Image (tube, rainbow, N blue to C red):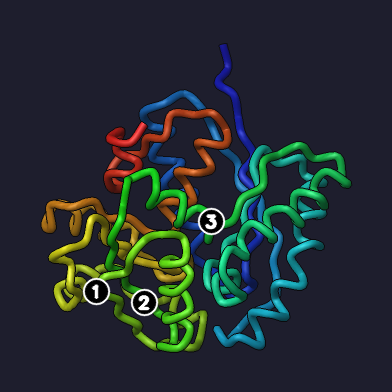
Amino acid sequence: MTAKTYRIGQIVPSSNTTMETEIPAMLRAREAIRPERFTFHSSRMRMHKVTREELEAMNREGLRCAAELADARVDVMSTACLVAIMAMGKGYHRDVERDLTAVARENHCSAPVMTSAGALVEGLKIMGAKKVSLLAPYMRSLCDLVVEYIESEGIKVVDSIAFEIPDNLEVGQRDPARLVEDVKKLNTANADVVVLSACVQMQSLPSIQIVENRLGIPVTSTAVCTTRRMLDHLGLEPIVPNAGALLGGTYR
C-alpha cells in the first residue's frame, strides 16, 4: 500500500529562507521513521526589513497568498512569520487564522489554517510551560512586543535576548551553531522551556537537541512548534528525531 502524501502550504515573507528549509528538514527526518510523505508549497509576501511599517504592508498580502495556496489544495496552511502577527496586538493570530480560513474556503480548500505565531503559543502550552526564556533576532522594541504577546497568553517570559538585526536576509544567514554559546547568556534558571529561536527566519534546528541535552529542560523554536501543529492538524503522530522534546514523543 502506498503511503499517503500530504501537501504542506506556507505563506512566507519574500526574504525568508529558513521556513522552506527547516520545516522540510524536520518532515524529511520524520519520513525516515514513519510512512507518510510530504510535498512543500509556498506563496510569498514582500518584506525586506523587519520594521513595523514593512510588517503591516506584508500582512495585507496574506489573503492573496492564502488564495494561491488554496488553488494547490494543500492539506494544511500556515503563515511563516511570527513577529508580523505578534507586533499587531494581543491575540491577533486568531484574527489572521479566521481571515485566511475564510479565503481558503472561498477558494474551495478545506485545509486547516494556522499561524506560526499561534503555533508557538500552542506548542508552549502543550509542554505545560508557565515560564520561558527566549532568543530572538529582532530590534529590542519588536522583541518586547513578542514578549508582551506571549505573556498575554498566560506564559511568563523570564528573560529574553534580542540580537537587533533589522535585515531579514542577514537574520537567515546567522549561523545556528552560535546559539549554543548565546544561550549561556540567557537566564534559564527558572524557565520551564527555552525558545531557542522566537523567529521563523533565525535558524536554530541544528542546535535544538544539543542545547536541550545540555540544559536538561525542553528547548524548542517557532519552526519546531509550527511543525508540531502541522502534524497535529493532519492527525499524524507528532514525532521528529533530534528536534527537541515537543517532537520527541514526550508530549502526545
Pair 3/2: label in front = 3
What x and y, as percent, mark residue 150? 43, 66
- Identified at 79% across, 47% down, the residue is 104
**Residue type, label 3:** Gly
How many residues crowd mark 2 within 10 Å: few (<14), some (14–19), many (20+)?
some
Q: How far is mark 1 from mark 3, CA to CA?
A: 26 Å
Q: Nearer the viewer, residue 131 or 201?
A: 131
- Identified at 49% across, 29% down, the residue is 236
Q: How far is mark 3 from mark 2, CA to CA?
A: 24 Å
What x and y, as percent, mark residue 12? 63, 64
- Identified at 62% across, 70% down, the residue is 13
What x and y, as percent, mark residue 8? 61, 44
- Identified at 76% across, 60% down, the residue is 65
Which residue has dot 3 on it?
118
**Residue type, label 1:** Arg
Q: Nearer the viewer, residue 249 or 124?
A: 124
Which residue has dot 2 on it?
174
Q: Compare marks 1 and 3 and give the one earlier in the sequence.
A: 3
**Residue type, label 2:** Arg
- Quadrant in which residue 194 is drawn: bottom left
Spot the residue most to the top.
1
Q: Compare marks 3 and 2 and give the one earlier in the sequence.
A: 3
Q: Is residue 212 left or right of residue 161?
A: left
* Vertical order, 241 against 161 (above or below): above
Contact, CB < 8 Å: mark 3 with mark 2? no
What x and y, as percent, mark residue 167? 50, 87
Q: Is residue 95 left or right of residue 152?
A: right
Which residue has dot 1 on it?
178
Placement of the N terminus among the 4 image quadrants? top right
Q: How far is mark 2 from mark 1, CA to CA?
A: 8 Å
Contact, CB < 8 Å: mark 2 with mark 1? yes
Q: Is residue 117 left or right of residue 137?
A: right
